[in-house]
Amino acid sequence: MSISRQNLSVIIVSFKSDHVIHRCIDSIDKQIEIIVIDNSNNTKFKKDIEEKYENVKCILSPKNIGMGAGNNTGIKNVEKDFAFILNPDVILEKNAIDEIINESKKIDTFGVIAPISDKILYPNYKIDKNYRFDPLNAFKVKSVDGYAMLLNLKKLKQLDNFNFFDENFFLYLENDDLCKRIRAKDENIYIIPKSKISHFGGEAVDLKYEYEIELSRNWHWMWSKFYFNKKHYGYLNAVIKIFNNLISAKFKFFYYFITFNTKKRKIYQMRLSGILNSMIGNKSFYRPKIED
């Protein structure tokens, strides 16, 4: 089944994203349904965005459930065969959707397809050694970044014992985990090089919360890295993968402690906490401490 505007929904998970999400929505064809999952439970945001855009439905989450669970909530509310996962700090170029639709007709089967980032030095995909980059035609990849990925819901729902995003991940690597499980089911993942996007990384949350979000990012990156490797490769391998991060975080924590750099010390304290909590099996519990 081919992708069309009538058979596609866009899912955007937001959290204090009022300052950027309008650029994202404005870059999407108004014929396409957009479902926003707002993790900040902002009733004013919901009212304003639904009044401004006829094609937008906003679902408020009573608490901050993170990216994976937020995307799953969106998927549960999609009645179409395809769901385009976007971060609020992504902008689609003019013909991005058209290129995806056109190129998808040439692909026999896929679980995920994605546009390509305009930042050449920071590709939004990981390529397998058996595959090659093609500047014109869709090419297979190992995984794609979670800020822009189109899921073939109809195909994926037919797979045995398949779940979408692992909600144990609050932030980071939930997309790598999903892609890895999709490939294990012999489904393909493609990049569409003619479909281009801009991703303003780190801008999804209002910059006035920058430091608290930075603490959260450091905690969750370390937690997710250990959990991902433990899940797929075993506990010992996860320890090996995280060992250098653990030593580095310890060293830098003590260095910034004795040099009285409170902000830097706190960042590496978060890294240590994320690693250790993941190692002892604690859930991904840390949440950014933000008050309006």
Image (cartoon, rainbow, N blue to C red):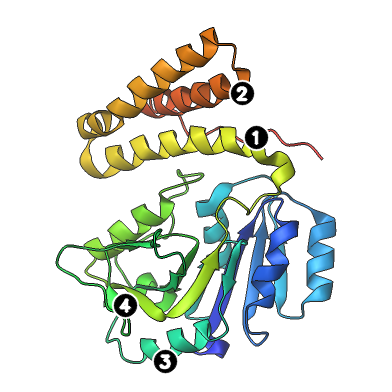
Q: Residue at x 41, y 39 (%)?
A: 224
What SS does tag 1 mark? helix
Circle 3 is placed at which residue position?
Answer: 102
Rendered view: 259 above or below 215: above
* For residue 3, side relative to residue 132 (left or right): right
Above or below — where is 112 with respect to 248? Answer: below
Residue 79, by quadrant, is bottom right
- Element type where label 2 sits in the image: helix
User: Are dots 2 and 1 in contact, CB under 8 Å?
Assistant: yes
Q: Mark 4 falls on what kind of element?
A: loop
Q: Nearer the viewer, mark 2 or mark 4?
A: 2
What's the residue type where badge 4 is placed? Phe
Name the residue tied to disc 1. Answer: 211
Residue in the image at 28% along x and 68% along y: 141
Which comes sooner in the sequence, label 3 or label 1?
3
Q: Which mark is residue 263?
A: 2
Name the mark on residue 110: 4
